[in-house]
Amino acid sequence: MTQLVEPIGSRERTVQTVRLRGWGSKYAIWITLAVLVVAAEIVSKGVFLDGQNVLNILAQNSVAGTLAVGQTLVILTAGIDLSLGSITALASMVVLLMQAHGSLTARLAGIGVALACGLVNGLLVTKGRVPPFVATLGMMQVALGLAYVVSNGYPIYEDKHATLLFGLDKVGPVPLIIGVWAIVAVIAWVITRRTSYGAYVYATGGNERAARVSGIRTDRAKLFVYVFAGFCAGVAAIIWINRLGYSAPNIGASLTLGSIAPVFVGGTSPFGGVGGVANTIGGVLIMGILINVMVLVGINVNIQQAVEGVIILAVVYMFIRQQRAR
Amino acid sequence: MTTNVARFPREALGSTSGMRDWRRLAVEYNAWILIVLLAAVGTAVTPIFFTVSNLTNILEQSSIIGVLALGQFLVILTGGIDLSVGSMMALTAMVGAMAMPTGSPIAVVAAVAVGGVLGMISGLVVVRGKIPAFIATFGMMAIARGLALTAHGGGAVNISMTSRFAQIGKGTFPIAIWAVAVLIVYVFLRRMRTGAYIYAVGGNVEATRVSGVNSGGVIVLVYAISGVCAAVTGLIFVARSGVALPTYGNGYELQTIAAVIVGGANIMGGEGKLSGAVIGVIFMTMLSNILDLVGANPFWSFCVIGAVLWLAVMLRSSLDRARLDRG
């Protein structure tokens, strides 16, 4: 994987164009989202902005959205986490196997396992010097294997539905899982944008060597993002069970890929250092709305994945062109 | 030609300490060491393991993912990655099965053409669009899966199991196909100039381009080959099961990558042996075969493969650092 060195001549642009371009790319995601919402409202003949429909979109994307938040932090350090789906599957199996001990114990156990998996990923990347792609590919296998072993390959169902919080699954019409997703996103946003740890995460992804030379402990930043991603996987497992009432060891493959797509669609750079949690939330919403509209207007659901693929390629292409222009 | 063209000249590896020597050998032959150890364990724990029928069985199971892994191997040699092989396999299986009523030669050509052209598009997106291989093929993965699902309304396509085409999935025929494919790749890598360029491109794209090699062309070619490998695998799958499903190959992309890395290829490109890409696949099948034979939960094989991946790569990176320390 090569990175091209920018020619020096490209610096000759005026400051103003750069600023304008910067503004455009900063808000491009929200402009796209706004346009999409208006378009969706028009083509669906007013069904789209119905409260229930909006809540549905948010609830449907809460698992992928939570995972995508964790994935964002990892990608910001120029890494990738291919194990998030498998960790979610393993954590959900642990929660369901422990359900007889009470939902709090079970959930803590699930999050604990997920954190442990994240920690192993982080240690492999930082101490073992294993490239993130391979480290997390290995964890994908290990977590998948464990999920199959503990469940013997069968789905597990909830014996008795465990509500999310204090006997509630919804406040009024709003499913609480949306709130859980929002809390995880806010935590991640605050960490990345308001703490020095977050600055280290961006610096590590922007230029690792420079960051290290200027005294930033890049290894700590990297260890942190994998542990945090593991935490997100644990939370996603709880949301999954709360939403569907069961889980299976093989749910992981599509979840991993589902966590990566919105990060890129949101405009976070695959090379690290650019983008962020807010972008990813925008990315999740764009993908969610597109799928929702396709369903509302009756486009063949089977073609959806192909459309997703084209969108990802188009967004990343635009992003990379813009980077080079700067 | 040695396998590490351009990266580290063989002389530079000349070692002063026995420890480093041991590590170098371990990295160089890790696939062979692993498979011999595993076969020894298998023979020790169960008498059924070392029988002709069981070993044939292992090869048969390996042959299907084996062809897929060959394409992945070539892509990884150039420093890329192909995440689309699994869904490409599903799409080409659907195309092949749907074209089957017009005659099996046309079906085979159609499937291979679809695989080759889509692979070429992935390659062009990487080279012309300057999009990282991971994302380019990630997009292609979604596109091919979407097309596979759309091809027949999300449903399965059956073929007649008595047709001549269905024979290629029977018995040891898939092993023969795999063997021929390995031979072709061998000749390509060792006897043709383009093959040597593949290692060179993986070693350093810029340097290779500057020295006059059409590195973009080489990259497009390997993705096209990977697409063709996916098509061959898809066709074998259809012939074997008599049905094409749009869900075929889910997760195979990561399995093939794991097999190639277990086989000793460097994920950064430029290094890796063809024999490793073959052994890596056999290792994975043999592992679950042994677990199965001794009555252990075969799912442990995933965990072992994950751990082997980590160990292989840690060993390699510790070796690379030892080289850098001295150089």
Image: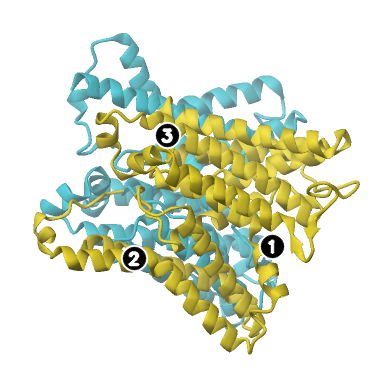
Chain colours: A yellow, B cyan
Q: Secondary structure at mark 2?
A: helix
Question: Could you give the CA–CA distance between mark 3 and mark 1, rounded to whole angstroms?
Answer: 31 Å
Please name the residue shown 52% across and 30% down the image.
B308
Labelled disc at residue B120: none
Hey, which quadrant is residue A139 in on the image? top right
| Classed neighbour count for the residue bearing mark 1: other residues with Cα under 10 Å, few (<14), some (14–19), many (≥20) | many
What amino acid does circle 2 point to? Ser
Labelled disc at residue A59: 1
Q: Are marks 3 and 1 on the same chain?
A: yes
Residue B31 visible, this angle: no
What amino acid does circle 3 point to? Ala
Q: Chain of mark 1?
A: A
Hey, which quadrant is residue A32 in on the image? bottom left
Labelled disc at residue A25: 2
Q: Is residue A293 left or right of residue A14?
A: right
The first of marks 3 and 1 along the sequence is: 1
Q: Nearer the viewer, residue B76 or A30?
A: A30
Q: Is residue B165 left or right of residue A151?
A: left
Residue B78 visible, this angle: yes
Mark 3 lies on residue: A221
The first of marks 3 and 2 along the sequence is: 2
Please name the residue shown 41% across and 47% down the image.
A76
Question: Could you say where residue B192 lies in the image, as x and y percent from the top left?
Answer: 24, 52
Please name the residue shown 54% across and 62% down the image.
A284
Question: Could you give the CA–CA distance between mark 2 and mark 1, rounded to whole angstroms?
Answer: 28 Å
Please name the residue shown 18% across and 67% down the image.
A16
In the rendered view, tell whether residue A319 sits above or below residue B114: above
Q: Chain of mark 2?
A: A
